Every structure is written in structure tokens, then in C-alpha cells.
Amino acid sequence: MTEPESHISTAGNQRRPRHSGPFRKIITGISLFFAICLIAVIGYVAAGWKLEDSIYMVIITIFGVGYGEVQPVESSALRALTIMVIIAGYGAVIYTIGGFMQMLIDGEINRALGARKMAKEIERMQGHTIICGIGRMGSILARNLFAAGKPFVVIDCDERRLKAAEEQGYWVIYGDASEETTLEQAGIARAAVLATVLSEDATNVFVTITAREMNADLMIIARGENPKTEKKLLGCGANRVVLPTAIGASKVAQLIMRPTAENMLEELTSEGAIKDELGHFGLQFEELQVTAGSAFVNKTLEKIEVRSERGYLVVAIRRANGDVEKDLTPDTTLLEGDTVIVLVHDTDVPRMTEKFASKGIKIRYRGATAEI
């Protein structure tokens, strides 16, 4: 993912809603300026001046051109009106210029140009991940994907969080993830995965429904705080549901019942462990996909035993329909389209690949797929 100069973009019309700051000052100043001009013109017309003379008088008065009065200003009311035009008009102009200068100082123009650049970059993305929500869970997810070099886009409605994400070098979009326009801007039609990790279950349900309608082939991973929401999320189109509370409680229970084993597992599965720590032990995960024509189709696990120096472990089987089987026995049968997940010593990988090379097996490791 290329480092962008600026990463904040907005949904729909490519403009972020501003309720404060320099942009609001500019709009307010311009509005006041025209309001003052209108009131002054009406005042001169009410005094018997022609419309074109009234407009001309207001312009040369506010901008201090000094061409002289169009008509004599003799009455006290007209003099008071002229003084009001000078003071209020100058004030509105100065206020507007001040807002514009502040916008330049704050880098608003640079951010606007960066937003256009970011939108073009997203249009070129293929097979990326969309993260809906950059809270605690979303931040950890984004950090891991960024470290792994995986392209992704973050969507959130909190400008403070987006600014922090921008400083980390992420592509970010300001908007509601449940809105089609926001997801379209994030490139949902070309995305491979959408992770909705917002804090509200109801919002995650809405995001899941919208995303599934827009991309039927999208892998959707949804967060759920209430275990009862899991069924709803799956029914709305989510492929996987993560329950942080349930996972945390299970982790605490395992630490109580099996502290030594859990400490060992924690060391292996800590941040960067799959890439680094397992390698220190000489271990790595391999995914062996059973393709059409494979000699292992409709064969049991005991039939595919591979003799090796240190042995290997079949961790799980992911069926073609997405179901994952972990309670395996020697009689577990492999089917076409299944993916066998194996934990093996790196010295035994060549032996395993040689075993499967002539059997029509496709091997995938850490996201890379190769036909053997």
C-alpha cells in the first residue's frame, strides 16, 4: 500500500461536513457580507436613490475606492447607514479573509487535494479489505494489516479517530459504513473482505446487510458483543462472527485451568508470532487444498499419512462450504474443495510437497497460492 500524502476522504460528494473551524468562518463571513450589502442597498433605495446608484454606492464604500458620493449624503439617516456599511462591510471582509488564511495555515487545501488523490488510489485497489470502525478493535486490526503490507481502507464517522489513523499512514474515509455511497467509495465491488468491528451490534447488522446486497462474493467478518446477535449477523450475510467478550472469557478460563499451556500458546500467538515465533521453533503452517482429480478425494486422513522425521499435525479441515472441522479422527474423509491445515516442521515441508506434488494438490502458504 503506497504511503499517501493525505488520506482523509468523504463519502458521497467528496466533501467533509464542517461545523466549526476556518471553513465555517469563510462561509459565515461571505454570508454576512452579502447580508450587509443587501440591507445597505435597500436602505439607499428607501431614501429615494436608484437601484444601480445604491449598488454602486455600497461597493465603493465598502472597498474604499474613494470616487466620491453618487449623491449628496445630507440626512442623518443616510450618514448613519453609510457609517454602518463601512464598519460592518470591512468587518465581514476581514473576518472572511481571516478564515481563509487560517484554512491555508491548517493545511485544509492540502488535505482536500490529498482526498482526491486518495479517492483515485482506492479506485485502483483490487482484493483489499474494508475496515468499518477504527476503535480499539479496528485499530489493532488495521495495525496488523498495515504491518503485513495488506491493502485496506478504514471507514469511520469520528474525525478524531480518523486523524489518528491518518497519522499512522492509513487510507481513511469519513462516513457512515451502513450507507451505500460510503461503501461504494471504499471500493466494495472490488474488495475481498469487509470487517465490521463497530461497537454497536445493530450498526454491524446494518453494515452487513448493505455490504452483502452490494457484493454477494464478499467475505464479511462481523463483530458481536451480545452472543444472541451472532445468529442475526450470520442470517444477514456475515461469513464469520467474532464475539470479543466470549473469547476473552474463554481465555481467562483457560489461564485458570491450564496456565502453563496457555502461557506457551500466548507466546506463540502474540503479535508477529506466526511469522517470527513459530519460525524460531522450526514450525510453520501449510494449507493443502484438495483439488479436482486429486488422489486424496474421498480418502480418510489415515490414508494420506506422510512419514517425516519429526511428524506433523493436521490442525483442521475447512470444507468447501466454509465449515471448519477441528475434532478430527483417522476416519475423517477428505472431499473435493477441502483445505487441510497442517502444522509441520520446516525441514519436512519438501517431503510433504513431494508427496502431494503428483496428486493434484494446490499448496497455499500465508496467502500465496501455487499449483504443484
Image (cartoon, helix red, strand yellow):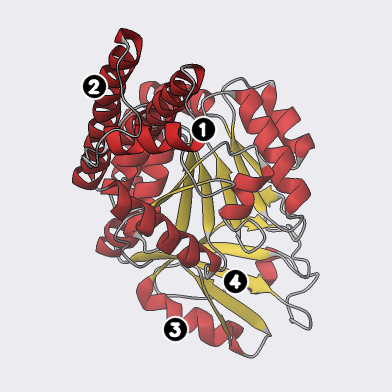
Q: Residue at x 50, y 28 (%)?
A: 244
Q: How far apart are labels 4 and 2 at the CA level?
A: 79 Å
Residue occupied by mark 2: 87
| Real-space Cα separation, disc 3 to disc 2, in angstroms | 85 Å
Secondary-structure class at tag 3: helix
- Is residue 19 something that shows in the picture? no
Q: Tag 3 or tag 4, which sits nearer the N-term? A: 4
Of labels 1 and 4, the one closer to you: 1
Residue 80 position within the rendered picture, expressed as x and y whole percent measured from the top left: 29, 12
- Percent x, y for residue 347? 36, 77
For residue 136, above or below residue 101 = above
Q: CA distance from mark 4 to mark 3?
A: 13 Å
Query: 280 and 39: which one is in front?
Result: 39
Q: Amino acid at mark 1?
A: Leu
For the C terminus, which image quadrant?
A: bottom right
**Mark seen at residue 51:** 1
Q: Quadrant of the N terminus?
A: bottom left
